[in-house]
Image: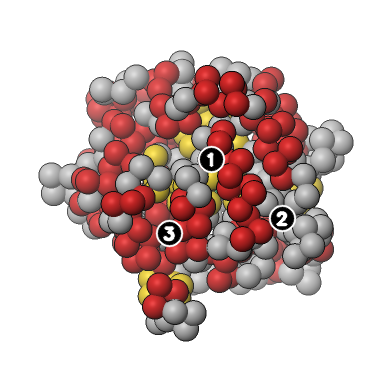
Amino acid sequence: MCVTSRRHFLGVLGAFGLGAVGVGGWKYWPEQGLINPCLANLPRTAIHHPLMQSVWAGLDPAQVWDSHVHLAGGGDSSNGTWFSPDMDSLWHPLLRLQKLFYMNAACVNETPHKLDASYVARMLNLIESMPAGFKALLFAFDLFHDEAGKADKKRSIFYIPNQYAAQVAHAHPAAFEWAASIHPYRADCVEALQLAVREGARAVKWLPSAMGIDPLSSRCDLFYEALAAADVPIISHAGRELAVQGGNRDFGNPLRLRRAMDHGVRVVIAHCASDGDDRDIDQGPNGPRVRSYKLFARMMDEPRYADKLHADISALTQFNRAWALKAVLQRDDWHPRLLNGSDYPLPGVMPLFSATDMANMGLLDPAAVPLLQEIRTHNPLLFDFSLKRLLRFEQHQFPSSVFETRRFFERKITRHQAIL
Ligand SMILES: [Zn+2]
């Protein structure tokens, strides 16, 4: 963050009275403050710290893909990326604040025509600190579409076109893979999927509530058939979404994704649906509201979805989701179906994480806290990864397979290409 934007950011925080009391769940002064200092290379003491050996022990870095990474862009180089002007408007203070946090988390240069390139440059810098072979799966992000399948920018928050995500991944093949984002109501959804697969897309990313996708609608069926034929998984958000608001919240009900799996599509539910509540529509349209996680867990335990339903553990270490960590760590039988992801740039949003809280919850050796805090100021991607590698609850921990996610995305790749 350059000096002017840092001053601007502090000014806006002040304007909203953000301090020791904080917003929402931030009931205390965050242990690492509000602002990501965006330091660069890790100090030698951190690189050679004995705990870093346990972080990478038993892993083949060539198999380690971070399966949940957001791209951002403001259309700097006519690449089609776009942010809603609401995110810069004083009339939408929370959106404006959110954008400032994300931009600070990603350490971008906000001077005109620098944002997009600096976002990618920072990620490349972070990935340089990882062992060779580590890659990040970059997400495209489609616009909100109405019932007629027409894109509606007024109801969208941001847009990352497939072409841009593919272009960034192709420019840096040692660091990135990419996932397309395709609204299933689009008249060209099947052609768009086929094009994306030819361009190397590993998955399709959805945020049903914000994009206006009802996964339970028969209007998705053609798209589901094409996904199943190509064996391309959907990575879908489920449960409450705070980071990208708007749209129809009910579309985020995890049970609505049953229809995709019933069509043979592999589904990855982001964050194990660990935030919010939804109606238990298995008991009818007016079923009781229960934790979204409970509905997700029910489907994980249904034998018919054993090879279809997967979940990512991205953001489970955020303070508002950490309650689910113990439950997920204890479910050793689910671990072969879990994928690690960081939800970058969120690990760089300083108030959202606390290594001390993790230690207080009995999930982390307190001796690891200072190291993790130091790593975080330099490299939020490595912080997130190291924290998850060091998590323990009783005799449970996430096995290497949760981090070696490449096999999940490369499955039957030759068959896809043969079909498409
Ligand atoms: Zn995300």
* Image quarter (top left, top right, bottom left or bottom right) of the N terminus: top right
Residue 370 in percent (x, y) is at 32, 41
User: Badge 2 is on which residue?
Assistant: 185
- Secondary structure under tag 2 reads loop
- Could you tell which of marks 3 and 1 lies nearer the N-terminus? 1
Look at the image and tell me whether residue 127 can be seen: no
| Label 1: element kind | helix
Label 2 to label 3: alpha-carbon separation: 24 Å
* 9 in relation to 136, above or below: below
Q: Please tell me how crowded label 1 is: few (under 14), some (14-19), or many (20+) other residues with Cα within 10 Å.
A: some
First in sequence, mark 2 or 1: give its number. 2
- Near-viewer residue (206 or 285): 285
Left or right, 412 with respect to 298, comes to: right
Relative to residue 28, is residue 63 depicted above or below? above
Mark 1 close to ligand 1, CB under 8 Å: no
Front-most of residues 249 and 45: 249
The residue where tag 1 is placed is: 228
Q: Secondary structure at mark 3?
A: helix
Task: Tell me how far mark 3 sits from mark 1, CA to CA.
Answer: 23 Å
Residue lying at 61% horizontally and 41% vertically, measured from the top left: 226
Identify residue for label 3: 273
Q: Is residue 257 above or below residue 312?
A: below
Mark 3 vs mark 1: in front: 1
Q: Amino acid at mark 3?
A: Ala
Please state which amino acid type lies under the numbered disc 2: Tyr
**Up/down of 214 relative to 126, above or below:** below
Residue occupying the point 59% across, 22% down: 417
